Amino acid sequence: MTRVLLKRVVRGLRRRSRLIDRLATKYRRRFPAPRSANEAGGSEGEGQGSIHDTRGVLEDATAIDGWVLVRGWSVDPSSVLRVGDNDVRLSADEPLQFWYRRDDVNTALSLNPDTRGGFLVLLPTAAAPLPTHRPIDLVRRGAILSRALVTSGPVDTIDQAALVLGADPTLDNIEERFERLGTPFADSRSQVDPAWHVQFSSPRPEKPPTLSIVIPLYGNEQYLSGQYACLATLDEPFRSAVEVVVANDKPSSDLRSLLHLYAELYGITTTLIGCATNQGFARAVNAGVKHAVGRNVIMLNSDCFFHDAQGVFDLAADLDLQPDLGTVAPLLLREDGAIDHLGMERVSLPGRPDCFVHTGAGLPLALAPREPLIRARYVTGACLAVRRDDFLHRFGGFPTFPLVGDFEDAALSDVIAGMGLALGVRTTVRATHFVRSSFEHRGDAGARDVLSRFNAWRYQRWLDRRESEGSGEMLAPDRGAR
Amino acid sequence: MRVLLVTPYLSERAGGVGVACARLLTALTEAGHEVFAFTLGDSDLRSRGRYTSSEGNIIHLRPRPIDPYWGDFGTRSSEAIEVRQIRSIVASIAPDVIHVHHLLGLGAEILPTVATGAPSAPIVYTHHDAWSVCLSDGRLVRRDSGQYCAEQNTVACSRCNAARGNPIDERVVFSRNLLSKHLLTRFVHSHYSPSKYFASRIAHDLGVRVDFLPNISPPVPEARPDGNLTLPRNRLGFFGQLTESKGVLSLIAAVDRYNAGNPERPVSLDIYGDGPLAEQIGEIADSEPRVAYRGAYPAHRASALMQRVDWVCLPSLWPEVSPIVLHEALAAGTPIIVSRAGGKQEHVAFDRNAIAVEDDSIESWADAIAGSQSPERQSAWADLSRQAQPLFSAEDSLRVTLDAYRSAISAHRA
């Protein structure tokens, strides 16, 4: 009887093993092992792919700022991640990690998520220092199922953050999860990053430009030709008085050739700066303004287009003539011609952090105010004119707490208003801003929603800290985020 | 005068723009002007560099890779070194005037490149279609509704393009139109179109003045049709590219409809040309005794072939700017059947050298064919033929072109 039972058990185990083999094969086909770990030079028996078990796989381990993001799956809830001498349980309750479920993997492998199937794990390296090429093992009952080497190649921090934040589609208590998550991505990046460097600079005119257009760029280089062509419509001496500073925030894009072409083609003084790692909108703009030489600066989103280039000088003139004006924005339109922005208003929604809506958004242009310059409490960061010295030294640049360009414009508005300066919208200067095109880089709608809520939550924390330290006083941009 | 032509096409085998530019180059050269041209080269340029000038003053530029964002329109990726090289070539030509005929294939960057190469030379731009304001092949036809387009609109343009299998969103439409507008308004000094209809539409959308300037007319053959040829005048002819937009299938259907209702007075249809529909047209001709497919024809024989038919039909489904076939038929002395829509009707005088079709529908075409067979029209055919003359002679069209150049030069100097 016992022998029969044993045979059955063995047969069952073999059947289960074959099933898992098939699933694993299917899984590997769909989620092939990344090259980076193999390229890291692991010896035989150490590199990724050599220690693979059908009960669990580590896909990769990537260093992000002060964290390591580990991706993989395991069919056994008792599996652990072995980091040096530490064993980290694959559990949402584990203090040394933040664990996220991967439903795409669970679906592909028909795994029960309750058994800790597909996972994304964030390991704080402060708790377990992990130099690159250090192995992380997936261990079950003392046996290594899979191994990944920590890599530190070019990492798109924002994409990785979007992946983590959007990994769990459950929005319940999401703000609580943010509290737990803390600030692994935005805060750990240094505020004054010496890594921003000039990648290309066109010949400088004899007379330094008085107006700088700073364009933070994250993969929207196809729009640059329209922005340059617009500036090219300026007659002299206006054209020589303008410079373009492009802050390329996507390290994988080499824009030197393109910017060289546009500078040559349109005769616009151009500087291209870049960074080894993605820094986010606010830091890109701040670095761009630092490299600008103009007395006034227009921060122009890559997907924002002036209708008439003379408008850039109209905005600058407002700053020159009205000392009480801290910043001025154009009237923004959408690509369909409707109004997009006449300033912003803060709104409260039940169960969610406060957010901002654009005044007049969606209305026909015919309903735009007739006053040439209107005041607003908040203005969007899509297109803003500021005095360079004000922006750098009085306002402290864009606050850097958000991931993706979001809420830093509201925070900058708070800083400017807190100093008793006015914010204006010049309705006679028109520009078109594409609605949320930059967010399309950030994954699907669910992930973007989570990102927006994350940024809103960060903004509220920034405000709370600001109030506790005394309103009206400028906060250093990174102070509020900590 | 030293003229630099910039055109993607410069051959009588390359459609309307190619024919117009080739005739302009010939006319200017024969009139003693010094003409240079930038045009598209083949992909297998013989030179190792980016240019070849194997045809005298015609400089062939390398084809540029298509930018996936812009598609056929707008910018094409290039290099600063190439801009500098083309600029230096233009500077060494030192033209008195630069006449740009299209940007298709050349890339929008060619405008600032040539403009900065010869800053003292004005740029005259001929809009041979509405490419500068219409992403739908520059034809000003709404592909989703079939209506002629009245105004540029990002949302409507996006829908129109989706209907023709080019799904682009409003942002692409907007950015492309904006780029086009900035470049054309900044670097072009005088805008022209060989169609008043297109001139007014383009002026509306670009916000610039666009004047009428005819293409160089084809030469009028010495031999004109004999007005005493035997009645009835029932031989219809189609000439041109065999594409759907040229309406050849609609014309066949209209002929079929007319013949079915008028078996005692049938008409025949001779089709000349080549294109994607050639095989289909050949099959129809094999099964339909009243339809004959005559194949492709060389441009210099067009007038002679048109004299073999009694009526030249222009059934295009888009407004057309200044159809070459129409001018060749007028030069040949063959009356025309053409619709009242768009630019097609600008170059004819209805009831003097042409019969009007109310719209581009098959029914209207069948009615117009019936009208051509009426006893009155049959007896008046000799008069119609006699009145068939190009609106401008070849000499006149060259003269107004040179006037446009001189006007642009003096305005630019001022």
Image (spheres, grey):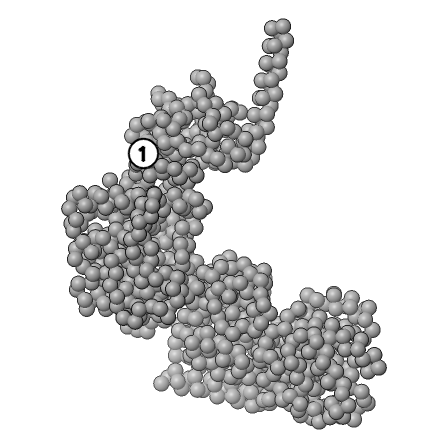
Q: Nearer the viewer, residue A189 or B232?
A: B232
Q: Is residue A422 left or right of residue A271?
A: left
Q: Nearer the viewer, residue B349 or A224?
A: B349
- Name which residue type carries label 1: Arg
Residue A183 shows up from this direction: yes
Q: Is residue B45 left or right of residue B116?
A: right
Q: Nearer the viewer, residue A130 or A312?
A: A312
Q: Is residue B394 left or right of residue A376?
A: right
- For image coordinates 51% across by 59% down, the residue present is B168
- For image coordinates 49% across by 80% down, the residue present is B200
**B377 w.r.t. A102: above or below:** below
- For image coordinates 53% across by 82% down, the residue present is B196
Q: Which residue is mark 1?
A: A180
Q: How many marks?
A: 1
**B288 w.r.t. B191: above or below:** above
> x and y percent of residue B371 in the render?
73, 85
> x and y percent of residue A329 in the render?
29, 62
Residue A383 shows up from this direction: no
